[in-house]
Image: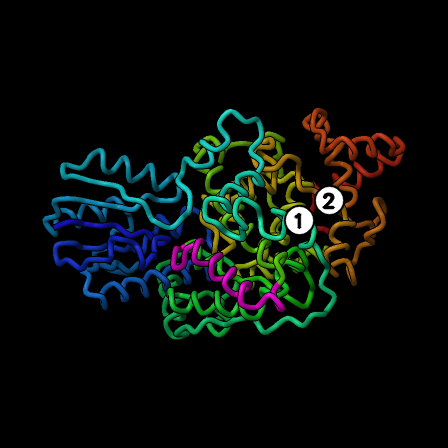
């Protein structure tokens, strides 16, 4: 009998493995403590993964496949991936072992080592999900000094004929990013967010199991507000809802944030994508089909902004991960060292932008990309938090967080700990950007216009202090030159006061 392993983020019903039903093939899916415990996860993330894995196992069984599903409390579950595999190989008289290539380096390394010690044959197959291979990005940028995403994105557009007119981009330009930076002020109205149909009793049972087994989690859980699809059919309905109701304004407001809105016009399909219920190519082709049919409602800039996120940024980030690992997860070029504030776990801070962004994260295991990058990530970098701690928090708090996508986005794009491999300059800002893109500054305890004083916005003093503290790292960076010139113009006595204020925040962040 042949044993085939399926990991929790390999829930692709269209994988070639499943085109043939054979009683001589046993599929195994496991709920593992090594996966729940390698970082502390948001409770909704673990519930979503286990729920989706169980639905996938049921689907395969209904199709006639032989499936062994090991629940967390199953007496036969040793809770270790390799120990379980060893027992199954022995108990079921397995003569060959196959697995789909993992997307996380640690699991890839673990399974390679396991196969090296096997006395039976083993093989690795592709997941047939991504539109690139692990090596595509490295090959594309071979010999180049900078890994500019835009050129990679254009190549993906050409290769898959997405929004193209022959060899030229539809509409005469590749990128409508400048159209994607509007502040949402209450109009147009935001349609109700899509609530996937889930069995609440099932979710409560999984939560109870995690409690019973002592799995450490954080965040909030309420079955009636669970926002993640647990099977492909529901994921496709959520995608269709986005394309029908939200895509017409997605591009315009994809960078906006608002105190009264958690999701705005975002699709919220990243969990379904990252566990492979749906594929990137079908996601973008579905969006483009809606655009083609409804051009009077959906402009090119809306759909291009969405396509860029999926087949541009997502594939690019995966390429960075496999090009740079394993050393990438240890990079700390700026030598940041401070611990995570307690309010990352409670949202108890007087900074309105941080309060809302972290509250959204804790309540929903979700925040959109600008909240992650320009609010929480921005503060984390300005406060010079250790990138290891920031990585662990981001990997744990978001339901869609798997290391291949989280690590380059956090350590690279957000924290610049990689020294510019992903981002040509640090994505930092003072209060002005936050005020421009949303209403978080309204009603805040701090004054967005002040750099010093008890009521000055912490982002302002932190920003100028960061530039001063790290200026040696940016002296040859052309994109930072203007800000460094402005730094030099700040009177010495004022800079002293700014830095004093900044270090009060850095050393005692929970007081702010």
**Residue 437: within the magenta?**
no
Above or below for 51 versus 164 = below
Left or right relative to 37: residue 77: left
Q: Position of residue 464 (x, y in %)?
A: 78, 38
Q: Is residue 266 left or right of residue 13?
A: right
Nearest to the observer: residue 91 or residue 293: 293
Image location of residue 162, percent across then percent down: 50, 51
> Residue placed farthest to the left in the image?
93
Residue at image x 82%, y 31%? 485
- Marks 1 and 2: in contact by CB < 8 Å? yes
Query: Badge 1: how crowded within 10 Å, few (<14), some, or many (20+)?
Result: many
The secondary element bearing badge 2 is classed as: loop
Residue 429, numbered label: 2
Q: Earlier in the sequence, mark 2 or mark 1?
A: 1
Q: Secondary structure at mark 1?
A: helix
For the question of whether residue 75 can be seen, the reply is no
Q: Is residue 495 above or below residue 15?
A: above
Q: Is residue 103 visible?
A: yes
Comparing 477 with 199, the one in front is 477
Which residue, given by chain and number where applicable, does mark 1 sit on? 374
Residue 396 % position (x, y): 49, 51
**Span shown in magenta:** 275-298
Packing grade of label 2 (10 A; few <14, some 14-19, many >=20) is some
């Amino acid at each position: 009998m042949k044993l085939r392993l399926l990991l929790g983020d390999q829930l692709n019903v269209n994988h070639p493995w499943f085109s043939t039903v054979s009683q001589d093939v046993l599929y195994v899916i496991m709920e593992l403590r090594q996966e729940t415990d390698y970082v502390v996860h948001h409770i909704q993330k673990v519930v979503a993964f286990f729920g989706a894995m169980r639905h996938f196992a049921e689907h395969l069984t209904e199709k006639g496949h032989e499936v062994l599903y090991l629940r967390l409390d199953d007496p036969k579950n040793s809770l270790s991936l390799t120990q379980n595999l060893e027992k199954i190989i022995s108990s079921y008289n397995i003569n060959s072992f196959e697995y789909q290539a993992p997307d996380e380096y640690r699991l890839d390394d673990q399974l390679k080592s396991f196969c090296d010690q096997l006395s039976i044959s083993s093989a690795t197959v592709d997941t047939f999900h991504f539109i690139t291979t692990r090596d595509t990005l490295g090959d594309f940028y071979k010999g180049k000094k900078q890994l500019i995403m835009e050129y990679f994105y254009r190549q993906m557009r050409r290769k898959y004929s997405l929004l193209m007119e022959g060899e030229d981009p539809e509409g005469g330009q590749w990128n409508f990013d400048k159209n994607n930076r509007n502040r949402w002020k209450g109009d147009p109205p935001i349609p109700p967010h899509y609530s996937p149909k889930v069995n609440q009793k099932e979710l409560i049972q999984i939560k109870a199991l995690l409690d019973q087994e002592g799995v450490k989690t954080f965040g909030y859980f309420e079955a009636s507000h669970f926002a993640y699809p647990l099977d492909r059919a529901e994921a496709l309905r959520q995608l269709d809802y986005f394309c029908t109701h939200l895509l017409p304004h997605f591009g315009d407001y994809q960078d906006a944030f608002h105190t009264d809105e958690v999701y705005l016009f975002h699709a919220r399909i990243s969990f379904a994508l990252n566990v492979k219920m749906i594929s990137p190519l079908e996601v973008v082709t579905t969006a483009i089909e809606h655009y083609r049919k409804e051009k009077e409602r959906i402009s090119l800039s809306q759909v291009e902004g969405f396509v860029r996120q999926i087949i541009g940024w997502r594939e690019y980030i995966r390429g960075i991960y496999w090009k740079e690992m394993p050393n990438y997860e240890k990079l700390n070029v700026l030598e940041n060292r401070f611990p995570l504030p307690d309010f990352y776990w409670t949202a108890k801070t007087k900074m309105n932008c941080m309060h809302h962004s972290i509250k959204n994260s804790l309540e929903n295991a979700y925040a959109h990309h600008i909240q992650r990058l320009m609010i929480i990530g921005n503060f984390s970098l300005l406060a010079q938090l250790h990138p290891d701690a920031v990585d662990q928090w981001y990997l744990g708090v978001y339901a869609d967080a798997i290391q291949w996508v989280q690590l380059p986005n956090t350590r690279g794009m957000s924290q610049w700990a990689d020294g510019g491999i992903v981002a040509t300059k640090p994505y930092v800002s003072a209060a002005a950007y936050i005020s421009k893109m949303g209403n978080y500054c309204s009603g805040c305890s701090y004054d967005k216009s002040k750099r010093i004083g008890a009521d000055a916005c912490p982002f302002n003093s932190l920003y100028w202090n960061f530039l001063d503290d790290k200026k040696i790292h940016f002296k040859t960076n052309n994109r930072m030159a203007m800000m460094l010139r402005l730094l030099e113009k700040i009177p010495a006595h004022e800079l002293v006061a700014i830095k004093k204020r900044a270090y009060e925040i850095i050393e005692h962040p929970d007081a702010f």
